Image (cartoon, rainbow, N blue to C red):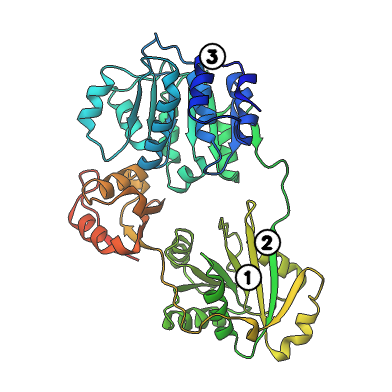
Amino acid sequence: MNFSTLPLEDSMLQTLDSLGYKQATPIQEQSLPYILDGKDIIAEAKTGSGKTAAFGIGLLSKLDVKKFRVQSLVLCPTRELADQVAKELRKIARFKHNIKILMLTGGESFGKQLGSLSHQAHIIVGTPGRVLKHLNKESLELSNLQTLVLDEADRMLDMGFLEEVESVLSFAPSERQTLLFSATYDATVLEISKKIQKDAISVKTTHEEVANKIRETFYATPNKEDCFVKILSEFKPQNVIVFTNTKVQAKELAESLQKRKIDALAIHGDLEQYERNDVLVQFSNKSCPILVATDVAARGLDIKELSMVVNFDIPHGKETYTHRIGRTGRAGAEGMAITLYSSYESDNANEYRDIKREFLEESDLKGSLDFQMPPAYITLVIEGGKKDKLRAGDLLGALTGDAGLDGSSIGKIDIYDRQAYVAIETKFIDDAHKRLKSGKIKGKKFSVWVL
């Protein structure tokens, strides 16, 4: 689709052409007609798909430049993304003079932002915490808001921004257009859509849900642990769930892998709830790449983007096998499911032989037994949570402000009633811990330790 088929001003079309936007990407083609028509949409769009231009063209087209009031608000999970979005919008905004786009994020001078806001703006791009702070101090006013965008809504919810987003919405007019852009639709994103949108139209760049794309391989081996290490060395997965049939095996395998400098944690029925939370937080925020689990303990786990599932033991029944391997290869990604079996399990393994499954020997692997797998992140625990009115923005602000970390070195944030977990890039963990321990969050001292 050419942009000229849309009801856009000639000056907008010329600007798009000069920026190299010759033809609409799939997400732009499917969403822009609805956006320009004032409809609410929930759009599934990956990074690099052209989503910023999709909502940017829409909100800039409807802007009344003579009306110096905030007409559009774009909320992003991180300062870096907000910066990217603001830059992209400013490029497209060249089609008309005097469009003012202002960025409101943590880690920047609040006073400077106050000065900029005193002269008003047409479009605000910001992070939920800082936008909410300006709303509470009445330095920002949204009574003229026409369009609200939640960019990377799934990541925003991962980082614990739901409460802040809902608080921001309480300042916005109920009659508005709300656009949600998300890398994946999960139950939480859809639930939020129902709360904050009206008759939202679902826009997906994939026309229908396809079955998980999973490469299934069975390896015959005399030593399962060695074989597993070779598999990790050869395929280098980002994260793995390893299934064992007993909790004793799960515990012993995790401990044995740790001795080999392969970062692993076990989850089984003997763990207390707080221990289970600690393990799951570390696995989901990339502080531990390998989770060794029993089937019972793995119930209810919802891990996005899982690279590999390994059956350390052949499961009891094909239904269990299907359930285990279905955790990988989601959201269009290709997954790997590997099953290990010893000579005395050959009969059980042969029951799984079919045209789509590959049966190989350990000797077919080229991986090394010296392979090590350290974590990409390490988790900081703050002894404060929702009950202490701690929000994701407060933690981001403390880490990127006083502690001096770059936002890109901070991973997932999980906030519970009494505790908060923050994933920090491994090489920065000591510095982050030291600075946060000696500093304050929201003017208060909190106990901080490394998980």
Q: Is residue 188 above or below residue 336?
A: above
Place of residue 178 in the rendered image (x, y in percent of width and height, measured from the top left): 53, 26
Q: Secondary structure at mark 3?
A: helix
Q: Is residue 366 above or below residue 146?
A: below
Who is closer to the viewer here, 136 or 424?
A: 424
Q: Residue at x 82, y 72 (%)?
A: 354
In which quadrant is the N terminus drawn? top right
How far apart are labels 2 and 1 at the CA level? 13 Å
Residue hosting label 1: 295
Q: Amino acid at mark 2?
A: Gly
Q: Which sits earlier in the primary sequence, circle 2 or circle 1?
A: 1
Place of residue 34 in the rendered image (x, y in percent of width and height, measured from the top left): 63, 24
Q: Is residue 281 visible?
A: yes
Q: Amino acid at mark 1?
A: Asp
How far apart are labels 3 and 1 at the CA level? 60 Å
**Dot 3: within a 10 Å radius of its alpha carbon, few (fewer than 14), some, or many (20 or more) residues?**
few
Q: Is residue 21 left or right of residue 110?
A: right
How far apart are labels 2 and 3 at the CA level? 49 Å
Q: Which numbered disc covers residue 10?
A: 3
Which-is-in-front pick, marks 3 and 1? 3
**Dot 1: within a 10 Å radius of its alpha carbon, few (fewer than 14), some, or many (20 or more) residues?**
some
Which-is-in-front pick, marks 2 and 3? 3
CB of mark 2 within 8 Å of CB of mark 1?
Answer: no
Q: Residue at x 68, y 88 (%)?
A: 342
Q: Amino acid at mark 3?
A: Asp
Place of residue 76 in the rendered image (x, y in percent of width and height, measured from the top left): 42, 37
Residue hosting label 2: 326
Place of residue 41 in the rendered image (x, y in percent of width and height, measured from the top left): 60, 29
Q: Which sits earlier in the primary sequence, circle 3 or circle 1?
A: 3
